[in-house]
Image (spheres, grey):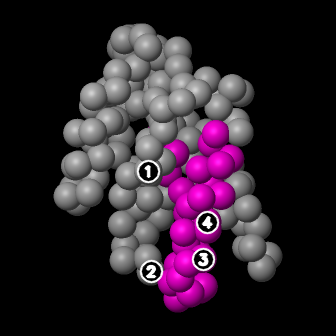
Amino acid sequence: MSMRLALACVVLGLALPEAPVHAADAARHIPDLIYATVDGKALGLDLHLPGGVRHPPLVVFVHGGAWTTGSKTQYPAFLLDRGFAVASLDFRSSSDAPFPADVFDIKAASAICVRRRRSTGIAPTTSAPAT
């Protein structure tokens, strides 16, 4: 686990979900939500929602890979067990588009999560990026 991810998890651990996680409720996974299309390439995110939490706080997860490799399928699943929702996203790699394109992609994905928070049940004011 990277140092930034560990730090983000510690900071987010201070924000408790509204309701406790119940083991009987299964987590929900919503794959391939398209948040942008750039030069004909669809950019998507996978949204993972913990079971038994009414309005979970959201972690926007940016996978590792030095901005050149990696996939949205890599996400910190342990956060679901602790009551956090996780949006794991794909973005343009630095070999596909120069900086700051990746930053724009991450901002666009975060904005979609905020706009869809009511339909997904995410807490309205608690989201944070993590890498």
Which residue is at a point 61% across and 65% down the rendered structure image? 105
Give the residue displayed 73% in from the left and 62% down from the top. 36
Image position of 116 (left or right of 96): right
Which residue in the structure is indicated by mark 1?
129
Query: Does the magenta run of residues contain 108?
Result: yes
Q: Is residue 96 left or right of residue 14?
A: right
Tell which circle, 2 or 1, labels the residue nearer the N-terminal end.
Answer: 2
Q: Position of residue 56 (x, y in %)?
A: 48, 25
Disc nearest the viewer among 2 and 1: 1
Q: For residue 29, what is the image quadrant? A: top right
Q: Which residues are magenta?
A: 86-114
Comes first in the chain, label 4 or label 1: 4
Place of residue 61 in the rendered image (x, y in percent of width and height, measured from the top left): 44, 52
Q: Residues within 10 Å of mark 3 (few under 14, many from 20)?
A: some
The quadrant of the rendering that contains the C terminus is bottom left
Tell me which residue sits at (71%, 27%) in the image: 119
How far is disc 4 from disc 3 in space, using C-alphas?
Answer: 6 Å
Instruction: Say the numbered circle drawn on residue 105.
Output: 4
Cα–Cα span, label 3 and label 1: 17 Å
Q: Which one is earlier in the sequence, the residue at label 3 or at label 1?
A: 3
From the image, tell me which residue sits under label 3. 101
Do callouts 4 and 3 mark residues in contact (Cβ within 8 Å)? Answer: yes
Q: Secondary structure beneath disc 1?
A: strand
Q: Position of residue 38 (x, y in %)?
A: 75, 73
| Label 2 crowd bin: few (<14), some (14–19), many (20+), radius 10 Å | few
Q: Secondary structure at mark 4?
A: helix
- Decide: few, some or many residues near mark 4? Use Cα within 10 Å; few <14, some 14-19, many ≥20: many
Q: Are marks 3 and 2 in contact (CB under 8 Å)?
A: no
Q: Which residue is mark 2?
A: 68
